[in-house]
Image (cartoon, rainbow, N blue to C red):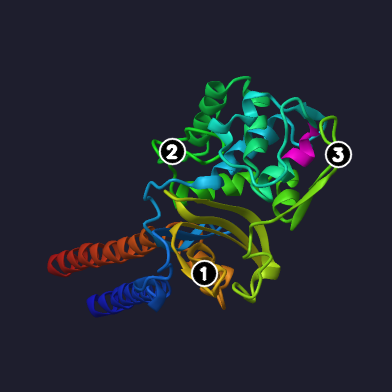
Amino acid sequence: MENKVFSKLKKIFLSLLLVAMIFSCTVQAFASDEYRDTDQAPHSKAAILYEATTDTVLYEKNADMELPPASMTKVMTAILVLEQNPELSGTLTVSKDAVRHYYCSSMGYPHLKAGEVISYKDCMAYMLIPSANEAATSFAFEIGGDMNTFLQMMNDKAKELGCKNTHFQDPVGLSSSDHYTTPRDMVKMCQYAMSFDSFREAVSADSVTVPVSNMRDESYECYTTNYVKFPDDRYESPYSGYVTGVKTGWTPAAGWCFSGCMEKDGLVWYSVVMGGDEEWYDEERIIQGDFRDTINLYSLTEGVTAEQLKAMHGAGIPAWLAVALVAAAAVLAVLAIVLIARAVNKGSKSV
């Protein structure tokens, strides 16, 4: 009897132990692919690649490093506008403060003028597609009433979204002192912004026409700065057709920054690259490190399935916890063996 009990429990224990080992090795094999140990964003200071449907970070490099986000800041500006006016209905009047050089710096296009009336929809597209600074400041004064109030709204919303390492000093992204975020926090902002149809529509367009107004007799057209979605010969890739947004940025202090979204094969990937460098591509053009690294990050998604990503979480729980649970079951089996063995031994002695 004792031998039969031991034999049966031994099989149970070995089976549980084998399951734990196989599960652990499977997770580790996927999570420890070769790219995990190499720099997949060599042209940038920090980066992250996140899949939203499975809540999985596939790759990260300094993902919690606090860096100036440049014009990626406008994602948060857009969020505050869309929360109050998700359909972007109606018009706003450009405040004279909104076009002050202090807030806008240089403006390359025939920019908006103080007192100009523009629709919310056109102003949003103008802010997100060519990254117009005066569009962002116009929204700030329209929504907040004054700049300090709007900045408080920005920082409060960042905390609400779970951004633990983010602080804003302007609605545009020109600031570098005490104005920062991280790739991980930027993903949270972009993911929330993309839940608004009006935002998705704007960041997926290649151009916007700012129409005639009460202050201007001619319209003017502006083009996107997102060369991952709309590439020229410098950034051609097989992923451009899957990219649905989101926002570019550059200042001398921030370097080249890009937050992107790619929807492919039923998966939704968010990428953020910050602090990108630049190199001369030809005699007249540079090639941006943020775009180069983003395209490289997207190449990591080749062949990756939702099932593999879920395996990293142990079918909905963190992988480390799933392994721990299986291991705990094996330990319980050992204890059961010991207890039953003692009972059997005690029974045989009494007989």
Whether 86 is drawn above or below 33: the answer is above
Q: Residues within 10 Å of mark 1 (few under 14, many from 20)?
A: many
Residue nearest the observer in this picture, 118 or 312: 118
* Res 33 quadrant in image: bottom left
* Res 8 quadrant in image: bottom left
Q: Which mark is residue 292?
A: 1
Mark 3 = which residue? 212
Mark 2 secondary-structure assignment: loop
Residue type, numbered disc 3? Val
Mark 2 or 1, nearer chain start? 2
Image point (41%, 75%), residue name: 35
Residue 347 is one of the magenta-drawn residues: no
Q: Please provide the residue range marked out in magenta.
A: 118-123
Q: Which mark is residue 83?
A: none
Mark 2 = which residue? 179
Q: Is residue 72 left or right of residue 276?
A: right
